[in-house]
Amino acid sequence: MNKKQDFKSALNVMDGIEQPGQINADAVKKLKSKRPQALSTNEFVHDIRSGNRTILSKAITLIESSLHSHQHKAQEIINSCLPFSGKSIRIGITGVPGVGKSTFIEALGMYLTTQGHKVAVLAIDPSSTRSKGSILGDKTRMEELAVNPLAYIRPSPSAGSLGGVARKTRETIILCEAAGFDVILVETVGVGQSETTVRSMVDFFLLLMLAGAGDELQGIKRGIMEMADAIFINKADGDNVNKAKAARIEYKNALHLFPPAESGWNPVVDLCSAQSRMGIETVWTYIGNFTETTKSNGFFEQQRKQQFRQVLTETIDQALKRDYYGRKDIAQSLAHYEKEVLAGNLSPYTAASMLLEKHKP
Ligand code: GDP
């Protein structure tokens, strides 16, 4: 025995006495089998489909990883899960911070699980590093739902580009569906561009609003209202009920000004109180009616196909851009042409077409 080996054990071992192995070989096997890298794609898919949440979470972690080998494995898993996906209703929920999104999601999620649904909750929030603990990662949010065996809550991937976060969320939806979740709730903060992104991955888009919070439109842009299949005025409780009723009329009138929706569904405006759980059932009834209408007129499928098409072109766009701008020769030429443009010697259009001509993508 050399000195190094002596240090391996804290026990003083007498020569001549047979020692058991230091590590339990069975335990090693078991531990190894739990490492995501050690599972084959088939094992992953099998476990995800049988509803194993630990493995589902591990697969989502692979999706979120930037390591090439993880990405490769994640893509294999996603492709194998695709045939088992798509059978859920995907619902986007948005509204300004403080409107009551997480309280609402907890209420809706709890209601749905009592109806026998399996609910997955995902979030899109590229702006937040979650350091303030205000978004899904905070343990104080959705306390009941978080321990509900029929629900699965996955915090948003840590901050990144909106495109990156969106892609991860889209892929996560596929895995959750393959795991048997039949209602997917995607939360996004009602500021900036993330609503448009969430809209492009869900079937039904719900906007939560507040009544009497000063400006009736609360910085929610007209475009976001236009994307909504339902607007619910939350906190319609206590002293707030009359204000909420007045706001309902106002929003209904605002919606009348929009052109009829392609879906054949007329967006609805109603009241709820996530806190007292009033109106939660109504939301679900509307979603049921929406699904019925859009499945029978073909819009439901058409919208999903359109979303696939959009992902395909977006992915190609991003890859082309990354490759193009990543090339050294192009970076050099770009610097040169930029100078020419800024010096007033070339128009930006001419410079762009010269660059594109010189370095074909
Ligand atoms: P989020 O930032 O949109 O996720 O909003 P939260 O769900 O965290 O809610 C913000 C605050 O509003 C919390 O203090 C909630 O308790 C409160 N809240 C949420 N829903 C209601 C409601 O229906 N009525 C009342 N009165 N308060 C609510």
Image (cartoon, rainbow, N blue to C red):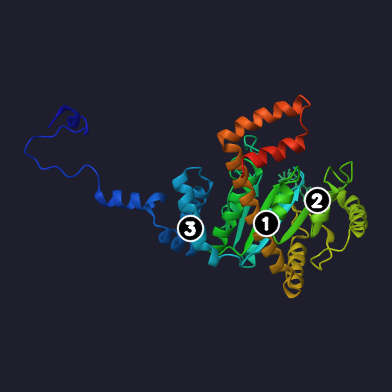
Is residue 176 left or right of 34 when viewed as pictured?
Answer: right
Q: Is mark 3 within 8 Å of ligand 1?
A: no
- Dot 1 amino acid type: Gln
Q: Looking at the image, is mark 2 or mark 3 earlier in the sequence?
A: 3
Query: Is residue 127 shown to the viewer in this render?
Result: no
Q: Is mark 2 within 8 Å of ligand 1?
A: no
Is residue 23 left or right of 181 when viewed as pictured?
Answer: left
Camera-near label (2 vs 1) is 1
Q: Looking at the image, is mark 3 or mark 1 earlier in the sequence?
A: 3
Question: Can you identify the residue that label 3 sits on?
Answer: 77
User: Dot 3 lies on which element?
Assistant: helix
Kindly indicate whether the residue at mark 3 contacts the one at mark 2 (C-beta within 8 angstroms): no
Cα–Cα gap, marks 2 and 1: 19 Å
Is residue 148 left or right of 39 when viewed as pictured?
Answer: right
User: Residue 141, image x and y in percent?
Assistant: 64, 46
The numbered disc on residue 310 is: 1
User: Residue 347, image x and y in percent?
Assistant: 78, 33
Residue at horizontal 64 percent and vertical 60 percent from the top: 308
Q: Looking at the image, is mark 2 or mark 1 earlier in the sequence?
A: 2
